[in-house]
Amino acid sequence: MDSHDSSELPEIIPTHIAIIMDGNGRWALARGLPRLAGHRAGTENLRRVIEACIEFGIRYLTIYAFSTENWGRPKEEVEGLMDIFEDVIDQELQELSDQGVQLRHIGRLDQLEPVFRDKVLHALDFTKNNQRLILNVAFNYGGRDEIICAIQHMIKDGVTSDAVTADLVNQYLFTAGVPDPDMIIRTSGELRGSNFLIWQGAYSEWFFPPVYWPDFDKEQLRLTLEEYGHRERRYGRLSPGAEEIDSNAC
Ligand code: IPE
Ligand code: IPE
Ligand code: MG
């Protein structure tokens, strides 16, 4: 274990970080390896980032593991990814639980193989009382799909048009009860959201560290958190003090 000096901790720690773990394929390609080797390296990195989040005192971490659009990749890659996810559950569940991680799933489970789905459900149940870090795994997740699902459920529940508010929509999303992400990090240099948390990310701060996901280490996370500390979140309002300056102007 590395020695931990609290002066290294970033000054401002957000409540909720969301990450688009992108660049596994290019990481592998750059090394002359198959894409799946990149996905395995990405999974190992995830373990390290989870540990760093725990050490930094992050309460919620949401990771984009597989999108509703990723089904469109070649069959071997999709099957390989499913195998990797299954291995992660088999090999890491106990340790994640020992670290106080509560696993939650966002997305749809119904299109998954029954054996895999059962493993996921078992992992959610096994960790449900842990409180140190809530880890939302976006798997077979799409932001548009989530909103469609919410609308369908509201209609089924007989919600009337007047009752539809932002708070109510929040309650119908996969992330019900989870605060909106303060920051969304996308590794690999791609500058887009790719259907991730499109409702919840309305006022998130975005970061695009120029490294592939398997190389996004604790130091990268610390630097990104420091950058977050320098951002001003205005939510459409003015900076504190700006109104005063304006009213003093003639
Ligand atoms: C992200 O890495 C992981 C998944 C989408 C499952 P990619 O596989 O998208 O890697 P690149 O973007 O091709 O490098
Ligand atoms: C987003 O990355 C999905 C995940 C990281 C799971 P993609 O690599 O699938 O997104 P695009 O195709 O570059 O937009
Ligand atoms: Mg990608």
Image (cartoon, rainbow, N blue to C red):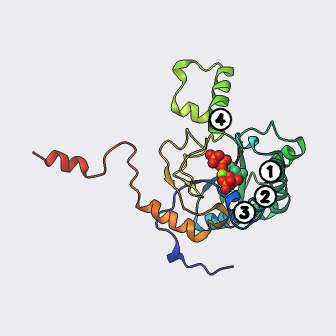
Q: Nearer the viewer, residue 99 or 138?
A: 138
Q: Are marks 1 and 2 in contact (CB under 8 Å)?
A: yes
Q: Earlier in the sequence, mark 2 or mark 3?
A: 3
Residue 12 relative to residue 29: left or right: left
Question: Circle 2 is placed at which residue position?
Answer: 36
User: x, y (%) of residue 173?
Assistant: 63, 36
Q: Is residue 107 visible?
A: yes
Q: Provide the secondary structure element on which disc 2 rests.
A: helix
> Pointer 3: residues within 10 angstroms few (<14), some, or many (20+)?
many
Residue 221 relative to residue 104: left or right: left
> Pointer 2: residues within 10 angstroms few (<14), some, or many (20+)?
some
The answer for how far apart the CA atoms under marks 3 and 4 are is 31 Å
Above or below, comparing residue 155 to residue 243 in the picture: above
State yes or no: Cβ of the residue under disc 3 lies below 8 Å from any atom of ligand 1: yes
Identify the amino acid type marked 1.
Glu
Q: Are marks 2 and 3 in contact (CB under 8 Å)?
A: yes
**Residue at the limit of the structure toward the bottom, as seen here:** 3
Question: Circle 3 is placed at which residue position?
Answer: 28
Identify the amino acid type marked 2.
Leu
Q: Provide the secondary structure element on which disc 4 rests.
A: helix
Question: Circle 4 is placed at which residue position?
Answer: 146
Q: Are marks 3 and 4 in contact (CB under 8 Å)?
A: no
Q: Earlier in the sequence, mark 1 or mark 2?
A: 2
Q: Earlier in the sequence, mark 3 or mark 1?
A: 3
Identify the amino acid type marked 4.
Glu
Q: Is residue 136 visible?
A: no
The answer for how far apart the CA atoms under marks 1 and 2 are is 7 Å
> Pointer 4: residues within 10 angstroms few (<14), some, or many (20+)?
many
